[in-house]
Amino acid sequence: ATGVEASPLAKKLGVELDKAGRVIVEKDLSIPGHKNIFVIGDMAAFYTSDGKQVPAVAPAAMQMAGTAVENILRDLLNKPRKEFIYIDKGSMATIGRNKAIVEIGKIKLSGFIAWLAWLLVHLISLIGFRNRLRVLSDWIWAYFTRERSAILITGDAEELQKLNLQK
């Protein structure tokens, strides 16, 4: 079995960690004894009210980020912090060409239908029509040609740095 390992930074903080090396956090995602430091994502060990640990996956990290940002803003406005509440939106994974598994609540799919659902969810989650169109066209190309596309960014490093400095 494999798992997600916490960042080595967690050990350097000198705070309480769980057995996977994740920082144990308060209900508002701050570190006990350090209310001005928030830990989110796969570095945070957060337990729900029923004792289950929030999984170290991107959707959970995104939810944590929203709560951490809201709590920082609430601190600036001298308002009480909100507790993080995890909402399990389910799991999806591709397991091969035309095959995937989907589990959302009591709904469980596998095979081609699950693969289409995975594609749709990932397209919807992209920001901007242009990105969605680009990814969709790349996927169609890869599906029919069995070749992957790539975007190459080339150029002289010094020239690119000058361009970035001028912005």
Image: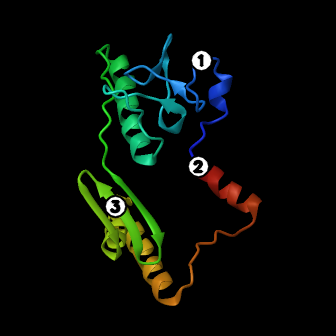
Closer to the N terminus: mark 1 or mark 2? 2
Select label 1 or label 3 by which is in front.
3
**Residue located 46% across and 22% down the image:** 25
x then y, percent, for residue 53: 42, 33
Task: For marks 1 and 2, give the CA distance.
Answer: 25 Å
Between circles 1 and 2, the one closer to the viewer is 2
Q: CA distance from mark 1 to mark 3?
A: 37 Å
Three-letter residue code for mark 1: Val
Asked if 155 appears above or below 65 in the picture, the reply is: below
The answer to the question of whether label 1 and label 2 lie on touching residues, with beta carbons closer than 8 A, is: no
Q: Are marks 1 and 3 in contact (CB under 8 Å)?
A: no
Residue closest to the eye, 99 or 120 = 99
Residue 28 x/y as whole percent:
38, 22
Residue 167 position, x and y percent, is 57, 52
Marks 2 and 3, Cα distance to the nearest angstrom? 20 Å
Q: Nearest the camera: 101 or 25?
A: 101
Q: Position of residue 117 (x, y in %)?
A: 31, 68
Looking at the picture, tell me which residue is in the foreground, 129 or 55: 55
Query: Which quarter of the picture shows residue 121?
Result: bottom left
User: How many neighbours does mark 2 have within 10 angstroms: few (below 14), some (14-19), or many (20 or more)?
Assistant: few
Q: Amino acid at mark 2?
A: Thr
Residue holding disc 3: 102
- The residue lying toward the viewer, choosing from 161 and 100, is 100
**Considering the numbered disc 3 on the image, is that residue within a helix, a strand or a loop?**
strand
Label disc, if present, on residue 2 of the rendered structure: 2
Q: Residue furthest left?
A: 106
Q: Residue furthest top?
A: 33
- Report the residue at 36% width, 39% height from top: 63
Question: Would you name the residue on which mark 1 appears?
Answer: 15
